[in-house]
Amino acid sequence: MTAPTLPASRGSLPPEGAARPWGGPAAGPGPTLLNVKGLRVSFGGQEVVHGIDFSIKAGEKLALVGESGSGKTVSALSLLRLVHNADVSGSALLNGRDLLQLTEHQLRGVRGDEVAIIFQEPMTALNPLYTVGDQIGEVLQLKKGLTPRQALASTIELLASTGIPEPARRADAFPHQLSGGQRQRAMIAMALASAPKLLLADEPTTALDVSLRGQILDLLADLQRQHGMAVLLITHDLNLVRRFADRVAVMEQGHLVEQGAVSDVFAAPQHAYTQMLLASKPERDVAPAQPPAADATPVLQARGLRVGYPVPLPGLTGWFKKGEFVAVQGADLDVAPGQTLGVIGESGSGKSTLALAALGLLPYQGNLQVTGSDWTQALKSGESRALRQRVQVVFQDPFSSLSPRMTIEQIVGEGLLVHQPGLSVAQRRERVVKALADVGLVDDPRRGGDWLQRYPHEFSGGQRQRLAIARALIIDPQLLVLDEPTSALDVTVQKQVLALLQRLQRERGLSYLLITHDVDVIQAMAHHVIVMKDGEVVESGPVEQVLRAPEHPYTRTLVQAAA
Amino acid sequence: MSNSTEAVTPSLSPSARAWRRFKRNRLGYWSLVLFCLLVVGSLFAEVLSNDRPLVVRYEGTTYFPMVKDYAETVFGGDFDTTTDYLDPFIREQITQGDNWAIYAPNPYGPQTLNYFAKLPNPSPPRLDNLFGTDDRGRDLLAQLIYGFRVSVLFALALTVIGVLLGVVTGAIQGFFGGKTDLAFQRFIEIWGSMPELYLLIIFSAVFAPSISLLLILLSLFGWMGLSDYVRAEFLRNRQLDYVRAARALGLSNWQIIWRHVLPNSLTPVVTFLPFRMSAAILALTSLDFLGLGVPPGTPSLGELLSQGKNNIDAWWISLSTFAVLVITLLLLTFMGDALRDALDPRKADK
């Protein structure tokens, strides 16, 4: 835990209340609404927020930015004492009242009334046993003293204002009956029910698909203007900050390292950490795309690939037969040796199913070949081992992709047990250490032994993802299926991992099947792209062509949402 | 989370770390020590509590009455029957002059009837019988020691069998899912609906009661609860990414179960282990109490409790048996907590 204290950081903090025209719309910032001074938060004697100062004016949009573990969420939630077992000190004046000095009873009056919160994951933030209308109505009855009838009318009005179609019907819906975007809109309606002066939005769009993120953000901006409330947006996504906020405060490891107007900070970041964050857009550093040689066998080739899942049918028919949900419908793709095919699409578009089929883990119809051998035949003839050695995988979630009860040596060395069972324990250990060095986890292979007996939980997300890559590479595959390899990582770590993948591709001539929802990642990594929507490939071609001149309207929305 | 730069502690093997985590729970650790002492002690019950002397030196010859029967005539008695070493005459014979005998610390066996007792039965605790005697004049301490041994060994066997059956059936259902799971679940529903206690009563009427019969009957019904937990864990774990990655590496089903899913599914098993031991001890005790358990004549805690009920004024019977049960169950519970900590590598080991 070291906080880089560069001299530049001192000068970067703009004087409080400086006469700077914030250039907002009509309902511009007014007097200071919330003034936080010297906020410190610690858990069991360990301090995680080291005395930060910030303030929000009425009607202002402040973004609190930082990577995971920087303390941004804890800082915001501890203002309302919503963090368990935390010792909070400092002061937080909301309209002259110090939130940190209020009794629990007084604070309950503030929560959901003057200050409302939107959480990241609306599915878990809404109670699954009550309808959305009940939950919003409850706030209205509690905080505004409305009768149930009035509350229902107001609820429908609120839902309508958040742009949910058929609000009267949706009010009777349970959370699971709404789509992800609708759920987040319902959460926003609930937060607005008490007409708060300050809205804490904790990563409000992270759980949503890219094309929905923009809509939700626009909605928040609209409502902010209408109600003249202040918004504290907690996020790790710099694109959101640029689009949404007036001012930005950057946090690193519990310190507030820089704050200022968004345009200033983005144009001329003063602190080294802010500069690093802004420069963390993945860079393209891959071998140029080569026109496929006529005789070269594609590493992976699919023709008319179709993957379906059996689903239970309702009623009596369900006893006798199963329905089918088609996740991938008639996909054609080619992955050339040493090249990357990017697959882009939103959740539910079938791209992860495609990955599992490519790994030979799902039954499929159509034609699917790995280096010229057919998966179905290999599985049938029991000779799948050779194909498995050629295709390996790296999954999205670095926490569930490593068995928590196995040591690093066991995890990384497992492939050797299967594919090179003749190795002695010492030889295997040597290979494991070498693999760890290849993925940049160990600087000096001779010292790698220290790592071998550790468990995955002792490693950070980026390190775990490197472990997953080492596990895949130790048996020298030709094709690596990357299923959202960096979407669970912080931006700076994402950049490092992508750079590692690019280096490995150049050094070993690996082919990648890269599955992602992130246009930036595609831009940095892919040679060819296919775009998937509802199980179908709607567009494909070289990366420059697809991203620069998208033909399909869906691709256009994706590219625009990322810009 | 650790940084790669931080000082690396010397690597310990996973089992050494687990043991360290176990030891860190003081209560659990000392419970284990005490429980092991009790169990090991009870395994040597014959040395601790026996109506026969361990060694006798009689007129220049060494005898081992503990392992061999000697007729009374050997020690100068009148009859050609097995020696009763509690007989004051024999006692005098083998201790006078150069003769000597080493008695067990508690000179009674579980079945020993002291025909030479000075008080009517049941007699309260006194120097002759430290914990008193039961209504037939048998020494209570001896019965507790032997009864504890029977209970613990029985519980251990029942737990091991139950856990093995439960884990295997749960693993098969959870890992293969689909039709296998469906068939097994229906079978468990039917099997679990059978009235276990009545079956026990019927069987104990049909067959000669014995410990092994009891073990088989209780095992037949004891695995279902655990099986459900293991099944649920397997269903959850088998769809996690590390299992998919293992499949992609080409591991066989058996390897995936053994190396990946099983170790991550054992938390409920381990957590329930001491409680299953407790439940097994209690089951045997209750059946004995009802007279459906071990064959008559086997020392057992349940039978003692039943005697305590019949002789409510002989408070020492109920009290000491009750205390032995409570202490045993308590030790098991404390060990359970420590065990759960030890098997979770996500807990920091310090």
Image (spheres, coloured by chain):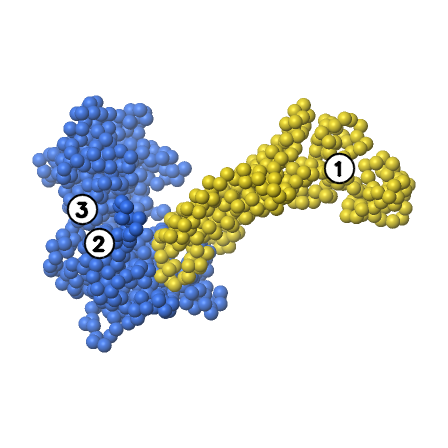
Chain colours: A blue, B yellow
Badge nearest the viewer, 3 or 2: 2
From the viewer's perspective, tell me whether residue A520 is left or right of residue A45: left
The crowd level at tag 3 (other Cα within 10 Å; few <14, some 14-19, many 20+) is some
Looking at the image, can residue A401 be seen? Answer: no
Q: Is residue A488 above or below residue A64?
A: below
The part of the image, by quadrant, that contains residue A170 is top left
x and y percent of residue B130 in the render?
73, 31
Q: Are marks 3 and 2 in contact (CB under 8 Å)?
A: no
Q: Is residue A249 above or below residue A298?
A: above
Report helix, strand or loop for mark 3: helix
From the viewer's perspective, tell me whether residue A499 is left or right of residue B123: left
**CA separation in Å, label 1 and label 3:** 84 Å
The residue at the point 77 percent across, 31 percent down is B128
Per the rendering, the mark at residue A349 is 2
| Chain of the residue that carries numbered disc 2 in the rendered image | A
- Residue extending farthest to the bottom is A295
Task: Specify which label sits upstream in the sequence, 3 or 2.
Answer: 3
The part of the image, by quadrant, that contains residue B248 is bottom left
| Chain of the residue that carries numbered disc 3 in the rendered image | A
**CA separation in Å, label 2 and label 1:** 80 Å
**CA separation in Å, label 3 and label 2:** 15 Å
Badge nearest the viewer, 2 or 1: 1
Per the image, the residue denoted by label 1 is: B112
From the viewer's perspective, tell me whether residue B236 is left or right of residue B169: left
The residue at the point 50 percent across, 45 percent down is B223
| Chain of the residue that carries numbered disc 1 in the rendered image | B
Per the image, the residue denoted by label 3 is: A212
Q: Amino acid at mark 3?
A: Leu
x and y percent of residue B258 in the render?
46, 56
